[in-house]
Image (cartoon, coloured by chain):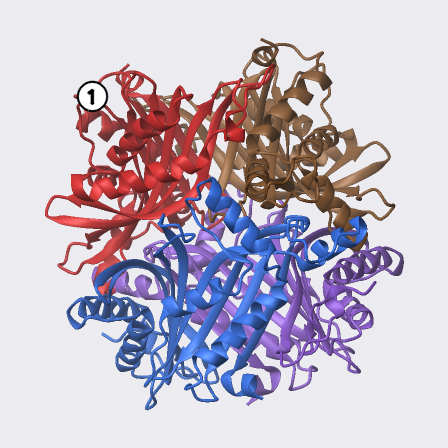
Chain colours: A purple, B red, C blue, D brown
Amino acid sequence: MSDIQNRVLKGSFKLTRVGVRDVRKPVIVKRPGRDVTLVVTFDLFVDLPAELKGSHMSRNLEVLSRVIDESVREKVTSLEDLGAMMCKELLARHEYASCSEVLMSADYFLERGPGNGTTSLERYTLKASATAERGGTARKRIGVEVTGMTACPCAMEEVRNIRGVSSGDLLASITHNQRNVTTLSMEVPSDSTVEADALIGIVEGCLSSPTFEILKRADEAKVVIDAHSNPKFVEDVVRDVLGKILDKFSNLPDDVRVSVKSESYESIHKHNAYAERDTTMGELRL
Amino acid sequence: MSDIQNRVLKGSFKLTRVGVRDVRKPVIVKRPGRDVTLVVTFDLFVDLPAELKGSHMSRNLEVLSRVIDESVREKVTSLEDLGAMMCKELLARHEYASCSEVLMSADYFLERGPGNGTTSLERYTLKASATAERGGTARKRIGVEVTGMTACPCAMEEVRNIRGVSSGDLLASITHNQRNVTTLSMEVPSDSTVEADALIGIVEGCLSSPTFEILKRADEAKVVIDAHSNPKFVEDVVRDVLGKILDKFSNLPDDVRVSVKSESYESIHKHNAYAERDTTMGELRL
Amino acid sequence: MSDIQNRVLKGSFKLTRVGVRDVRKPVIVKRPGRDVTLVVTFDLFVDLPAELKGSHMSRNLEVLSRVIDESVREKVTSLEDLGAMMCKELLARHEYASCSEVLMSADYFLERGPGNGTTSLERYTLKASATAERGGTARKRIGVEVTGMTACPCAMEEVRNIRGVSSGDLLASITHNQRNVTTLSMEVPSDSTVEADALIGIVEGCLSSPTFEILKRADEAKVVIDAHSNPKFVEDVVRDVLGKILDKFSNLPDDVRVSVKSESYESIHKHNAYAERDTTMGELRL
Amino acid sequence: MSDIQNRVLKGSFKLTRVGVRDVRKPVIVKRPGRDVTLVVTFDLFVDLPAELKGSHMSRNLEVLSRVIDESVREKVTSLEDLGAMMCKELLARHEYASCSEVLMSADYFLERGPGNGTTSLERYTLKASATAERGGTARKRIGVEVTGMTACPCAMEEVRNIRGVSSGDLLASITHNQRNVTTLSMEVPSDSTVEADALIGIVEGCLSSPTFEILKRADEAKVVIDAHSNPKFVEDVVRDVLGKILDKFSNLPDDVRVSVKSESYESIHKHNAYAERDTTMGELRL
């Protein structure tokens, strides 16, 4: 008996993406010195030619299960490598498809502290993806979503103006500050490595201050003082991240895509402030 | 033909709530001087005795449609009154039920400004509900969810201590501040009126500062200065709201339920700070 | 005094999008024979050249307020027209920007029924947007998100095979069916009209069945029978919508963009099935 | 220097819950034969007496970190036991509090299959909690959220009536079916054990059918046939779970609380059907 999906259509349309969304699985990634268990949400797609009625979606789940099982034996070291393996396998199993795509998202934790010895596991989000075309090499992408703090430079200056205080006086620098979520995502060429931990470090270095779960009184004051010494618009955060990416990844070729987004959940507004740059290493070098 | 829902069961269990969730409808509420269109999300429930197989859920939607249609003619003046009408009608249509419940939530807008003449429509959430028992009077509840700003008193004092600044110096008062969402919900006795607008006013008066969508430079500085002149823990917000409720609604009887919740989306942490009091007017008067 | 945003930077990066997200406002749209109040969530962006430190975000809110106020007098007839007005005004107010963008989303209601005279207000989502480049005409887009029902053709056939039933026997056609959300979005050329209500009608005609809030017993049976007479993969839904778009909008030029996405919240799986085509009228005509 | 939180208030109000929400941490739970890594979202609260200005919220995070670290050495076998340890420690650290509470939620996976040998890791949610009063024993609770499938008995019968088919004919049994999420939560007396896996098994046995990620054609047909052989209202699901709880946990005392909620994301409606019972073992035995 033939599957209904295999029926041949006439005069129909090809589809850009067909597959499954919101599949969740635990995945073990081998990191230097430790194994990390991630609970990953996956979307898996292939394209579908105009003449085929349906995509065999159960194959996507079989690919997912198989590659995750293999990853335990083969010591997969990153989500984006896992995605690239899946993209290749999706094209092998969907013989009619010309391209495949895998999107991944997972909570991630790193031990961090405000510098006085106290640390805690801080929470981040990994956002990885991979795409492949039949006969080509998979393109991989790794991204991080980092929650931190921005202090507004504009309100700080305006308060000083009103009160007649010089800008050299840090303590006289009240302003609104707020929770900020910044996302940095980069293509990873097949012969290069881009570590998610390095991307997290870059973003945390570009906020007014990183944030921490456990802050004793003196640490809390330090974070507040650091943030007010370092006021940032969302525009500043995105540009500073772009500058550090240029420095850190000077070896990457021009066609590598880079995306940075920063969103501040403004304390003085009910809406959010947002800045974004979607670009390539080549454009950044101009 | 008899409905399958009417089948008689033996040895089964009564159910506390049976009904429909996440029904959305536009509703027009008549306010002094204006008609307000609200897009309301409804949950509607009745209980079910042990001996009946099923509740007739389509009746809940018929009640909803009918009461909303009537409300246009009958000039309903509040969501909680609409809910009370629905509770009564649910008991009329579900002859087997002993109690009914309606939950409602809607975006709501009021014209507000920082005091210099500029105003904008600020966004709030209304949370209303009603419950009824057969033979009794419906109990109604109105609540508001207000987004504003809190500035932390603890970090402010700690920074002053470290820097050797006196607490009289407002400008030397940097601290973390952040978006805060505070919810105030109260029972409305059948012979009393509690205006949502009054509840919003109470909550906004208990935050470090209310927030506004349109802030020119000088207004932004004013909001920042106001907030730093008025630092608040979430504990302070909840208690100040409780105090104002006691003052404002001194006429309400002891058994009127009051609930206040305040959550700060901490700028120096990735988690939230939270305080809550669930009580009655009588307990507050002790 | 000059704004800190106006500071000139050297060696910095231009930004693709700078602005505000998640602003909510009530908007009145004039439709034939009625005024519709929509509660709209807006994102508003402009780009920012490399040499400017910051974008004046409060101008975005001023544009929003002003255009919404004007819309009451000028009888704006659609969200996408409102967006185009805002895009133009954003470029006027942000003299440094070369392009602007407005995204809008709102609950929307139409009176619908299963064909027996009973109707209710069914809920949809409008998704509109507009973009503009300085010196050019705004490009507008209108989209609808429609919740309905799909019944799986594959499981239907497999059950028949196992039980030895012919495919002519509708009642012998059990299969899994489920809630489906399909989104259709189209560019609207400045000299053309695309009605959201027409797009909703197209999508509802391509599902296994539209769904309704109030269904008496006989209507419920009719919807179930209709859906099983009309089994659909998500692939089928997307392709059928594309076909109807080609027919209905044969007058639209080749460069008009069209996007269709269909997601089934599978009843036999914990994940979703998904199909998508992102294309132009010209590609569809090939 | 004394903390601002320690200030003594006059004429203020006690608070019911003060603490932190939405803290996320990886936790390792020791299960028979395996260690399970859970990514847990925590809320931690204590109460606050009227005369104290603030709660020391950083202590909540210290308790969380310490107890999670200890759990690695002490082989904690369940989330609710972890919560009980935290409740005890919260009271030790917040010397002014009279009660404490910990809420926990985490994705959870079990290997499952439709009975033909193929299995996959199916996704569930654990919902655990613990509360303690000073001088008393902690009360613990474990819950599971299970996604499965319900097929409607009412539409099935109505279709048969319309078509004149006898109810013995399974294949002539088309009806709407849909994704359902059912939550079962139980108190766990300190001298008893309630396994989350057992609760998941109970719920899956009370749905029209459990669901699976990987279903080959024959398996898909089997799940569809199973579901149609076993049509269920949400009312039926809740009552069947209550019946199985009574059987399975006949040893538990009368004051043990039990809560069951079932929500069907109706395929023929845009809203959900819902049933709930919140009760005790004693009431169920009446």
Q: Chain of mark 1?
A: B
Residue A65 drawn above or below residue D186 = below
- C170 or D26, which is in the foreground? C170
Decide if residue A26 is on the left or right side of residue B285: right
Residue D19: percent from left, percent from top: 48, 33
**Quadrant position of residue A2:** bottom right
**Quadrant position of residue C62:** bottom left
Decide if residue C176 is on the left or right side of residue C35: right
Residue C275: percent from left, percent from top: 61, 67
Residue that numbered label 1 is attached to: B252
Residue pictured at 22% horizontal, 17% vertical: B253
- B73 or D4, which is in the foreground? B73
Q: Amino acid at mark 1?
A: Leu
Residue D31: percent from left, percent from top: 80, 33
Decide if residue A98 is on the left or right side of residue C22: right
Decide if residue D174 is on the left or right side of residue A29: left
- The answer to whether residue A253 of the structure is visible from this angle is yes
- The answer to whether residue A39 of the structure is visible from this angle is no
Give the position of the C terminus of chain D as an image quadrant. top right
Give the position of the N terminus of chain D as an image quadrant. top left
Residue A109 drawn above or below residue B189 = below
Spot the residue most to the left.
Answer: B33
